[in-house]
Each structure stands twice: as C-alpha cells, then as structure tokens.
Image (cartoon, grey):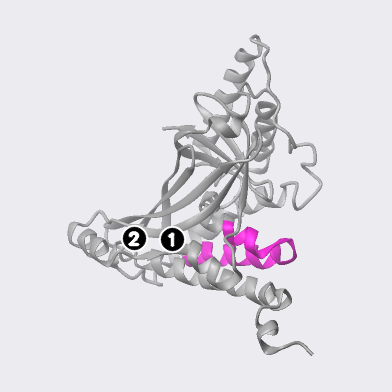
C-alpha cells in the first residue's frame, strides 16, 4: 500500500483532468473579473444591443475556426510543417501583390471578424501562398519589434499567450473544454470592443497587449478603455518555432484620469506562472510557429493552427 505522502505526489492525481479544467475555470473567472472592471466601472449586463451585435459578428470567426486544419479536412494543405525560404528575387513582386490584397481584405473585414465565407477562402489562400514564399531564413529568430494584429482566424484575444497557455494546459484530451471556455469568455465580454491588439517581441520576452473599450451605460455616449498586458518568457527552438511561458497578466490604465489613478493604485496583477507552478508543478510551454516574416508583416500559428497576421508598428 502506498503511503499517504506518496499519494499526495502521485502524477495520476496531480495531472488529472479535473486539475486542468480547474485551471481553465480559475483563469477565465479572474480575467473576466478584470475585464468587467476595466476603467474601474462594472460593466452593465443591460447592454444587450451591443451583445447582440457581438454574437452576430463572431459567427464569421466561428466559421473561420471551424475550417482550420485542426477541426476539419478542408484546409489540410494549409499548414507548412517547416519554414521554407524563397530566394527568388522575382517573387518579390508576387509577395507584394499578395500582401496588398491580404491587407485590404483584413481592413474591410475588420481583421477578419466580418468576413464572408468567400472572403475567408480568399484569405486562407493568400496566407498559404505567402507562407510558401517566405523570404526570411529562421523566421522565428527574426520577429523582434512591435507588431499590431491585423487579421485573425479566431477570437482576437487568443493571440495572447495568456489564453494560449490555458489551451496548452488543457491538453488535447480537454481541447473541447478549453474552446468552450474561450467562447464563454467571448460572450462574457460581449459588451466590450477590442481595440488595438499588439505584441512586443525581444530576444527573450514577448509582451502581449490587448486594448478593451467598454460602453459605460446604454445610451450614454461615453466609453472607458483599458489594456490587458501579459508578459511571457520566450525561447526560439527551431527555424519557425518559438516557445513562450507566461509570467504575469495585469490590467493597465483607463482613459478617465481618476479611474486611471485608481487602477494604478490597485495594481491588479495575476502571477500566472506562479499559479501554474502551484497547481500543476510547471508552467505550460506554448509553441508559436512563424512561417512568414519580412520587414512589414508576420504570420503566426498557434497549437490548433489558428493563424494571426501582424503588421509591424
């Protein structure tokens, strides 16, 4: 018979499905609470018109996600398992034309949120062509700088390593649970609007910043904004892959001076890395793959092959 001390440290207990689900629930509740207090004002549940608009808009992103290689066979030709390098100088003209069309479509569809099925198919084709014409050797090592999200095949907030780490912690066996909680989080912030979504990348750090704009009350022409900032450690492990591990997440200032001072004094910060270590003994390592990068844009894919297109700020 095992001793009680051994049982407490049993991998079968410490790595259980219940623990993974508990992590997802905990982080979603904490972050949704922080979102509700962006700018220091609780979001009113009465903002039903904005919520209805949000539900309508996410149907396009849902269709995008349902068509990714991780869920259906429609896009099996899209992933590139290893980064390629195109050294043909004549292809520069092709790349410029593809990028121009991609950025125009990203703009008119609001980063893909309002894209039709035909537009989604065009965007997927443009991205796959660009990935095949990548001009940069070792793309994962050449992503330093500040980048703005201009296109996403899933919810914008999932570009953040905070949510990426939750997905990795859930594992493939609990992928559906993680996706359901992402959808619930999406609905919980339905009275909000995502503003600028950006990443600042250095040699060993990735800082993700997501701007939220919240309507104060229905009928009142005033919006309050704040920024959810996630800091992660970064390590490049292959030509196309960087691995990130989350350190902390916090909510930064408001556009209202008094509330901005309130948030600065509150210093709401979630030590995500420490929480992971306490609950499961380690911090999830999130693989982010970059198959295209040049002086203007970067195309990144997550563990489920959702793609995120960034432009250099």
For label 2, the SS is strand
Q: Could you say where residue 165 lies in the image, as x and y percent from the top left? A: 58, 58
Q: Residue at x 75, y 46 (%)?
A: 69
For label 1, the SS is helix
Of residues 154 and 141, which is closer to you in this image?
Answer: 141
Q: Could you say where residue 125 lies in the image, as x and y percent from the top left? A: 70, 32
Q: Which mark is residue 50?
A: 1
Q: Residue at x 71, y 52 (%)?
A: 66
Q: Quadrant of the C terminus?
A: top left
Q: Which residues are magenta?
A: 165-188
State which mark lies toward you, 1 or 2.
2
Of residues 281 and 125, which is closer to you in this image?
Answer: 281
Quarter residue 308 falls in = top right
Categorize mark 1 by other alpha carbons within 10 Å: few (<14), some (14-19), many (20+). some
Quarter residue 168 falls in = bottom right
Main SS class of the magenta portion in the image: helix
Q: Residue at x 76, y 87 (%)?
A: 2
């Amino acid at each position: 018979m095992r001793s009680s001390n051994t049982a407490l440290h049993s991998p079968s207990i410490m790595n259980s499905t219940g623990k993974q689900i508990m992590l997802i629930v905990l982080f979603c509740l904490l972050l949704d609470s922080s979102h509700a207090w962006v700018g220091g004002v609780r979001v009113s549940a009465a903002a039903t018109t904005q919520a209805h608009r949000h539900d309508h808009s996410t149907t396009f992103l849902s269709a995008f996600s349902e068509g990714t290689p991780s869920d259906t066979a429609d896009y099996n030709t899209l992933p590139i398992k290893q980064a390629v390098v195109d050294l043909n100088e004549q292809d520069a003209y092709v790349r410029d034309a593809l990028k121009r069309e991609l950025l125009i479509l990203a703009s008119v569809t609001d980063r893909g949120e309002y894209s039709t099925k035909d537009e989604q198919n065009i965007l997927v084709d443009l991205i796959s062509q660009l990935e095949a014409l990548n001009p940069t050797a070792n793309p994962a090592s050449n992503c330093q700088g500040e980048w703005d999200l201009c296109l996403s095949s899933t919810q914008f907030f999932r570009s953040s390593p905070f949510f990426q780490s939750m997905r990795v912690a859930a594992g493939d066996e609990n992928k559906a649970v993680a996706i359901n909680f992402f959808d619930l989080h999406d609905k919980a912030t339905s009275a909000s609007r995502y503003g600028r979504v950006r990443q600042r990348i250095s040699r060993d750090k990735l800082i993700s910043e997501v701007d939220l704009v919240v309507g104060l009350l229905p009928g009142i022409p005033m919006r309050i904004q704040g920024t959810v900032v996630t800091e992660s450690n970064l390590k490049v492990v292959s030509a196309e892959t960087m691995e990130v591990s989350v350190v902390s997440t916090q909510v930064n200032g408001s556009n209202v001076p008094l509330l901005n001072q309130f948030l600065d004094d509150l210093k709401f910060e979630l030590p995500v890395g420490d929480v992971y270590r306490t609950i499961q003994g380690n911090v999830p390592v999130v693989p982010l793959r970059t198959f295209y990068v040049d002086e203007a844009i970067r195309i990144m894919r997550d563990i489920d092959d959702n793609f995120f297109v960034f432009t250099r700020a």
